[in-house]
Image (spheres, rainbow, N blue to C red):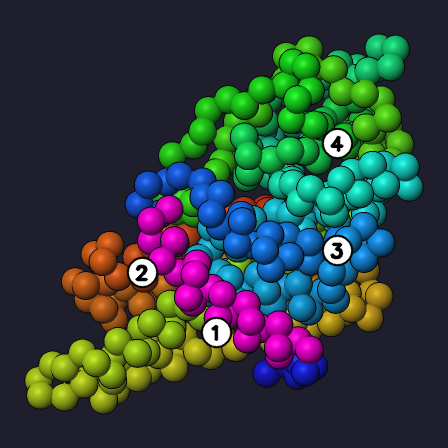
């Protein structure tokens, strides 16, 4: 078990109370309708949870990594879709912090501190998921603007975000050295929102297609240098994958909490099913894998807090273990509830659907295993 400071304990209890009392009821509704909830946004803004990683000089909280990931876990215990808002905001903030010029930071992070707008991270394309180098979206510098053509898909926060940290090809012949990052503002001429996806899980988190048709992005919105996008991606993605790991951990913990309580209430053959060894063993295995995931996640977070940046294989291990655990734990939670677990009157079936997303988002678990193996054999 990680040792939290008094301040971290206070934050955790505050976020846990907010999640249980205010987000849990909304989670049911947004899963049923599949609609994005501005009510959730307002709640997160009220408690400054969309500014966790924003530097203090711009009006943010600038919390340590352990606290940031802990908040994602606590929110995900009751509403994974709401936790995705925090994780996505954090991903974009990381990208800007590690790559933007001081002028860009003053411009965009200053606005974020005052306006509290939403951000989105745009990388995936129809033919470029795990294979980033296959992206087709192109940007060509013409005068004071980059002219961008192409599309992105499966973009979290599409259509509700104000700015998009976007990665495209500026030189198709240079492989990963031809990738560049940009800040694309929602009112950019030639930029529009395409299809809104109807998803299996994470239904309260809006996912869309982005369309670029001769979109005019000011050259001052280029992040870092032209062709430096791959380095920005690698520096950012290690943190974003750890965020998804925490999301998975929260989903798993929420499912275990619900299932364990249910076993004490459900009576069969004259006694609570919690007294049956078969159920006890299932609960024990769920707990073992959750605590193992938690230990790996927060050990990796502590590495970041100590200034260690070479965490890519550890982030991959944490994401892989936690998301596989979330899928197994939520599936077992449905099994423990039996017929009731399969019904939408109970939250565990939603948690199972949400858990599946964590095995895919920010790089499939097959890609994570490739990263882990390469690090081991290097």
Q: Residue at x 68, y 69 (%)?
A: 66
Q: Are marks 1 and 2 in contact (CB under 8 Å)?
A: no
Residue under numbered circle 3? 60
Residue 307 sits in quarter: bottom right
Tell me, yes or no, whether the two marked residues, 1 and 3, touch with CB atoms within 8 Å.
no
Mark 4 and mark 3 lie on one chain; the one further toward the N terminus is 3
Secondary element under disc 3, as helix, strand or loop, is: loop
List x then y, in percent, for residue 226.
86, 28
Mark 1 and mark 3 lie on one chain; the one further toward the N terminus is 3
Residue at (76% x, 40% y) in the render = 111
Q: Nearer the viewer, residue 20 or 183?
A: 20
Q: Residues within 10 Å of mark 2 (few under 14, many from 20)?
A: many
Q: Mark 2 or mark 3, which is nearer the start of the sequence?
A: 3
Residue 198, horizontal then vertical, whole percent: 38, 34
Residue named by callout 2: 347
**Dot placed on the residue nearer the N-terminal end, 2 or 4:** 4
| In front of the other: 171 or 350 | 350
Find out whether residue 42 is within the magenta segment: no
Pointer 4 with pointer 1, Cβ within 8 A: no
- First-in-chain label (1 vs 2): 1
Q: Nearer the viewer, mark 4 or mark 1?
A: 4
Mark 4 and mark 3 residues within 8 Å of each other at the beta carbon: no
Question: Bounds of the magenta span?
Answer: 7-30
Q: Quadrant of the C terminus?
A: bottom right
Give how far apart the Cα atoms at labels 3 and 2 are: 33 Å
Residue beneath disc 1: 289
User: Residue, x 49% and y 60% (percent of image)?
Assistant: 76
Q: Which residue is mark 4?
A: 183
Numbered circles on residues, count: 4
Q: Nearer the viewer, mark 4 or mark 3?
A: 3
Q: Nearer the viewer, residue 231 or 19?
A: 19
């Amino acid at each position: 078990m990680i040792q939290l400071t008094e301040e971290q304990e206070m934050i955790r209890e505050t976020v846990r109370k907010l999640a249980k009392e205010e987000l849990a009821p909304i989670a049911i509704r947004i899963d049923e309708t599949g609609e994005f909830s501005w009510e959730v946004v307002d709640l997160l803004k009220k408690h400054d949870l969309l500014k966790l990683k924003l530097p203090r000089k711009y009006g943010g909280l600038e919390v340590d990594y352990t606290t940031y990931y802990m908040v994602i876990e606590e929110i995900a215990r009751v509403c994974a879709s709401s936790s995705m808002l925090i994780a996505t905001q954090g991903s974009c903030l990381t990208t800007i912090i590690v790559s933007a010029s001081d002028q860009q930071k003053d411009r965009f992070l200053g606005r974020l501190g005052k306006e509290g707008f939403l951000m989105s991270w745009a990388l995936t394309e129809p033919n470029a998921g795990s294979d980033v180098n296959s992206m087709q979206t192109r940007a060509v510098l013409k005068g004071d603007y980059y002219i961008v053509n192409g599309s992105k898909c499966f973009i979290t926060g599409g259509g509700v975000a104000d700015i998009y940290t976007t990665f495209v090809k500026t030189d198709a012949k240079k492989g990963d050295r031809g990738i560049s990052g940009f800040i694309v503002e929602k009112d950019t001429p030639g930029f529009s929102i395409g299809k809104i996806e109807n998803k299996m899980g994470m239904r309260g988190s809006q996912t869309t297609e982005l369309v670029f048709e001769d979109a005019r992005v000011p050259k001052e919105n280029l992040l870092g240098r032209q062709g430096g996008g791959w380095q920005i991606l690698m520096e950012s993605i290690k943190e974003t994958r750890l965020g998804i790991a925490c999301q998975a951990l929260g989903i798993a913990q929420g499912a275990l909490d619900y299932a364990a309580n249910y076993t004490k209430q459900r009576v069969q053959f004259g006694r609570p099913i919690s007294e049956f060894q078969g159920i006890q063993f299932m609960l024990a295995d769920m707990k073992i894998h959750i605590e193992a995931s938690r230990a790996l996640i927060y050990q990796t977070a502590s590495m970041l807090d100590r200034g260690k940046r070479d965490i890519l294989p550890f982030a991959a291990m944490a994401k892989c273990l936690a998301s596989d655990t979330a899928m197994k734990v939520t599936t077992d939670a449905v099994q423990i509830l039996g017929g009731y677990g399969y019904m939408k009157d109970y939250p565990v079936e939603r948690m199972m659907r949400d858990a599946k997303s964590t095995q895919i988002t920010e790089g499939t678990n097959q890609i994570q295993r490739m990263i882990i193996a390469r690090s081991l054999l290097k």
